[in-house]
Image (tube, grey):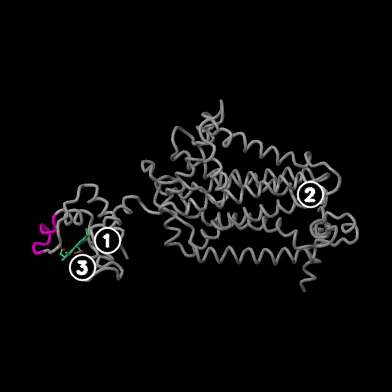
Amino acid sequence: MSRRIVQWLDNRLNLSPIRVALLDEPIPGGASWIYIFGSITLFFFLLQMVTGMFLSIYYSPSTEHAYVSIQYIMDEVEFGSFIRGLHHWGASGMMVAIGLHMLQVFLYGAYKKPRELLWVVGVVLLILTLAFGFSGYLLPWDQRAYWATQVGINMVGTLPVIGDVLIRVIRGGQNLGAMTLTRFFALHTLFLPWLLMTLVVLHLFILRRVGPAGPWDEAQAARISEPFWPKQVAMDAVAIGVAFALIASLALLVPAPLSDPANPSDTSFTPVPEWYFLFYYQLLKYLEGPLEIVGTVVLPILFILGLFALPWLDRGQGRRPASRPMVMGAGAGFLLVVVTFLGLSSYEVASIPRSDPSVLRGTALYQELDCAGCHRIHGEGEAFAPDLSYVGDTRSRDWLIQHFRDPQTLVPDSDMPAYGLNDQELNDLTNYMVTLKR
Ligand code: HEC
């Protein structure tokens, strides 16, 4: 039956040549698990497209509504938190997949003649993916988004001559605000997807014209050759299944983060970029003052130019890693720097206090004044006075401040001492109390 349908369609659409072009591509040296990363990357891109389309049903790219629309997706929309989780972790998955894909191509010298163009398009795809990450990070319009983007955009400002103009173009005005949000949204959901899609097609087109490189050992490559279908397709499918299972579990177990709403006047917030920018963020910390421009302009430009030029820099005979010591050394050195800086940076980021500094001061005050000598919070402290575990649910800020000033004005027979706190202490302690909610 299905055969007859295929036959029927084939008679009308003449599909056989397309099937040959798509699936019968010979792989020198045969199918291998080492070739799966390109397909995984493509899968992640498709996953981002689909989840992104669903998110855009509820997301509103305005400074008033962006944050609450994300909150709504997380709390109210059926499967909303899962879909946003897939999109959030999928972005990270795509970065990892691209990294591994490039590592494989790098190790195998697969960018060498005649595959230079394939590599060049690949580098552009990498840059576009990073742009996806950067533009997407702003969209939830929370504190993380706002301050990390602020830092990123300010880096552009260190570019000589065109820096100021460029900054204004990216922001859409003098400040990071409504104009920035809409243009990042347009970039993220219209410009970049179309560009990326076109280049993916070009990437695959070139791949099919020159064919995959295969193993670096010429003799081994010549010995056997297997078509893409069915073995490599099966391996790719298994790998994609595993990758999806990983991302789906993450999406279920670890909800995508959402900090407080963006607050341009709260400069106490420590900006932290997404992890795949962290190593670079760490590097920038060491390059201060006159050296800043080395980190923000010189190194990134050299790096990108170096990537583009790689096939022409590495022109020796053969693709064996052993016969390319310079290139392998440079690659290993780069990886070492990335891993070290990522490690250092994660360590520093982990030690940033997550909450509001005022709340932290209030918590410290609670301990200093030994409030636990009478009160209990989640089982800690004496039960002489009311349990404060959920006092934020029952008492208002004004009530609490007045109560701390002079308990007897509100509860005439109160045994609670008046501590004679100053205004800031009153405020800090109250800020801590109102966080005690169910
Ligand atoms: C000597 C014991 C004692 C100490 C120490 C004490 N309290 Fe109390 N607190 C009480 C008593 C008794 C009440 C109930 C009467 C009242 O509301 O004033 C109370 C009430 C409160 C309430 C109102 C609870 C409610 O919902 O009615 C808050 C909030 C509170 N205390 C916070 C604090 C904090 C913060 C500290 C430390 C700075 C502290 N207390 C130290 C005895 C104490």
Q: Residues within 10 Å of mark 3 (few under 14, many from 20)?
A: few
**With 200 as the anchor, is 316 left or right in this view?**
right
Q: Residue 338: percent from the left, percent from the top?
A: 61, 48
Foreground pick, 149 / 269: 269
> Residue farthest to the left?
412
**With 163 as the anchor, is 242 left or right in this view?**
right
- Dot 2 amino acid type: Gly
If you read the primary sequence from the N terminus, does the residue marked by circle 2 or circle 1 appear first?
Answer: 2
Residue 233 is marked as none
Task: Determine whether the residue tagged by mark 3 lies in a helix, strand or loop.
Answer: loop
**With 57 as the anchor, is 28 left or right in this view?**
right
Give how far apart the Cα atoms at labels 2 and 1 are. Answer: 61 Å
Cβ of mark 3 under 8 A from ligand 1: yes
Ligand 1 shows up in the quarter that is bottom left
Disc 1 or disc 3, which is closer to the eye?
3
Give the residue pinned by disc 3.
386
- Dot 1 amino acid type: Gly
Q: Residue 8: percent from the left, percent from the top?
A: 80, 65
Give how far apart the Cα atoms at labels 1 and 3 are. Answer: 13 Å
Instruction: Please give the name of the residue rendered at 48% of the width and 61% of the height, measured from the top-left corner.
Output: 255
Instruction: Please give the name of the residue rendered at 62% of the width and 64% of the height, measured from the top-left corner.
Output: 244
Disc 2 or disc 1, which is closer to the eye?
2
Instruction: Report if residue 104 lies within the magenta region.
Output: no
Give the residue pinned by disc 1.
392
Residue segment shown in magenta: 406-413
- Dot 3 amino acid type: Pro
Task: Determine whether the residue tagged by mark 2 lies in a helix, strand or loop.
Answer: loop
Instruction: Please give the name of the residue rendered at 50% of the width and 63% of the height, measured from the top-left corner.
Output: 254
Give the residue pinned by disc 2.
109
> Residue farthest to the top?
161
Foreground pick, 112 / 56: 112
Q: Quadrant of the N terminus?
A: bottom right
